Image (spheres, helix red, strand yellow):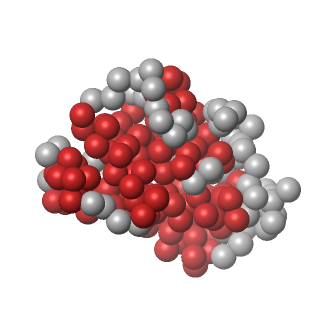
Amino acid sequence: MTRIEPLDPPYPDPVDRALRRWMPPGVPHEPLTLFRVLHRHPELASRMFALGAGLLSHGLLPAVDREIVIARVTARAGCAYEWGVHAATLAQQAGLDLEQLRATTDPHPAGVRWSPRHTALLDAVDELHDTARLSQPAWDALHAHYEDAQLLEFLVLTGWYRTISYLANGLLLEEEGWATPFPAR
């Protein structure tokens, strides 16, 4: 059971409007539990929305690259909640298949052939997770595929989804019923 109960409908008008902004139009289920918990602190939720929405909707990284990063960050942080939400929605829309998504949860992904660009992303996420730094070889591998603005975005994206993982794990959020189940290890 989550440590802070999510809001339940009917929502006050300002919260209802905010939650509708957070969810894509026509989604057949309630807003995410994470969003409904965050709206226990509407000002914080509003500040978080700006960065989160910006990374997802207006980023410079290709969608597939963004979703590989999110899947690996959340998998490394053991965040089944956020991994499953993205695996069921945005990752598949970006073109990742279930085999690739499962590979992001494997400490030593085998069986999936990643492009050199995607290997550089996965290696950099792992290095950041383990050391909170990027070595020169990891930076150079990324820089071979990305411009400076994209590299800045990559660093913010990894940190943002580490934060989201801390939030979801710290709150003990249960996986959404429609989300892709996190693979058993």
Vertical relation: 136 (above or below) 124: below
Quadrant of residue 169 in the image? bottom right
Q: Position of residue 134 (x, y in %)?
A: 30, 61
Relative placement, left or right, of 118 versus 86 is left
Q: Which residue: 21% across, 53% down?
A: 137
Q: Which residue: 37% across, 43% down?
A: 122
Relative placement, left or right, of 99 versus 133 is right
Relative placement, left or right, of 7 versus 121 is right
Point out the image quarter for the C terminus.
top right
Q: Which residue: 27% across, 29% down?
A: 115
Point out the image quarter for the N terminus.
bottom right
Task: Confirm whether residue 26 shows in the render.
Answer: no
Q: Which residue: 41% across, 23% down?
A: 112
Q: Position of residue 54 (x, y in %)?
A: 37, 59
Vertical relation: 53 (above or below) 38: above
Quadrant of residue 117 in the image? top left
Q: Position of residue 114 (x, y in %)?
A: 33, 29
Quadrant of residue 4 in the image? bottom right
- Of residue 28 and residue 3, the one placed in the foreground of this image is 3
Q: Residue furthest right?
A: 1
Task: Confirm whether residue 130 shows in the render.
Answer: yes
Q: Position of residue 152 (x, y in %)?
A: 26, 62
- Of residue 182 and residue 34, the one placed in the foreground of this image is 182
- Of residue 81 and residue 28, the one placed in the foreground of this image is 81
Give the total of numbered labels: 0
